[in-house]
Amino acid sequence: MGDDRTNAGATGADGSNTAGIRERISLGPGMLAGVGAYLLGYLVTYATQAGAVRERVSGLNFLASLFGGDPVAAWQGVGWYFYNAHFVATVSPSFGGGTRSSNLLASADAGLSYLYAVPPLALLLAGAAVAVVEGVDDPADGALAALGVVPAYVLLAAVGTVVFAYGVGDAGSVHPDYVTGALLAGVVYPTVFGGIGGALGSLVGDA
């Protein structure tokens, strides 16, 4: 199957190399793997940090209750941690006007640095799974096939910046940064780590 994919890359359906590259990107399995990687990364973060997040936002929730506001849900705060693990800042209103950016994960317990490895590992697994399912036996073809994880991951990453937003009335909201959430977390991470995973997964098919 690796030879067929290589030949497709050389000529493509319409005789062009660009068309051949598109054909080598596995969109079907890639979409499923991209969704799985995003959910796996979030669920691991939730399972390990939900309690700590509840404790950390308890002071904010107390103030919110005094003014009749809604509390920050644990799943929202975990979302901020999850995006921080992609090096996406959490944006919040500033008391002096405007906004400020912070990495809540970086300012938390130093023992949480392992969470930075969660998104890359989830995407490595996703990319490898795509290559194995497709039966790719060439690292370059595996990396290309694994790019199919990008569309689903970027969609979820962009939507998540809105879903994980916590409104604070007229002052604005606390949310993962929209731009880096979509571009860094949504595009760069799955492209790099999904691609590496696909290349590694091809070695399994070639074994």
Image: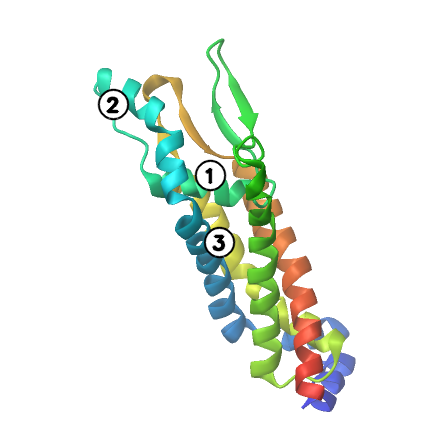
Residue position for label 1: 80
Question: Is residue 3 visible from the viewing direction of this image?
Answer: yes
Q: Position of residue 4 (x, y in %)?
A: 70, 90
Q: Where is residue 173 in the image (x, y as percent from the top left)?
A: 40, 27
Whether residue 40 is situated above or below residue 23 in the rendered picture: above
Whether residue 204 is situated above or below residue 91 in the rendered picture: below
Judged left or right of residue 156, residue 128 is right
Lower position in the chain sequence, tag 1 or tag 2 = 2
Residue 155's disc number: 3
Residue 69's disc number: 2
Q: In which quarter of the view is residue 199 placed?
A: bottom right
CA separation, marks 1 and 2? 19 Å
Lower position in the chain sequence, tag 3 or tag 1 = 1
Q: What element carries label 3?
A: helix
Would you call the spot at circle 3 few (<14 residues within 10 Å), some (14-19), or many (20 or more)?
some
Q: Which amino acid does label 2 sit on?
A: Gly
Would you call the spot at circle 2 few (<14 residues within 10 Å), some (14-19), or many (20 or more)?
some
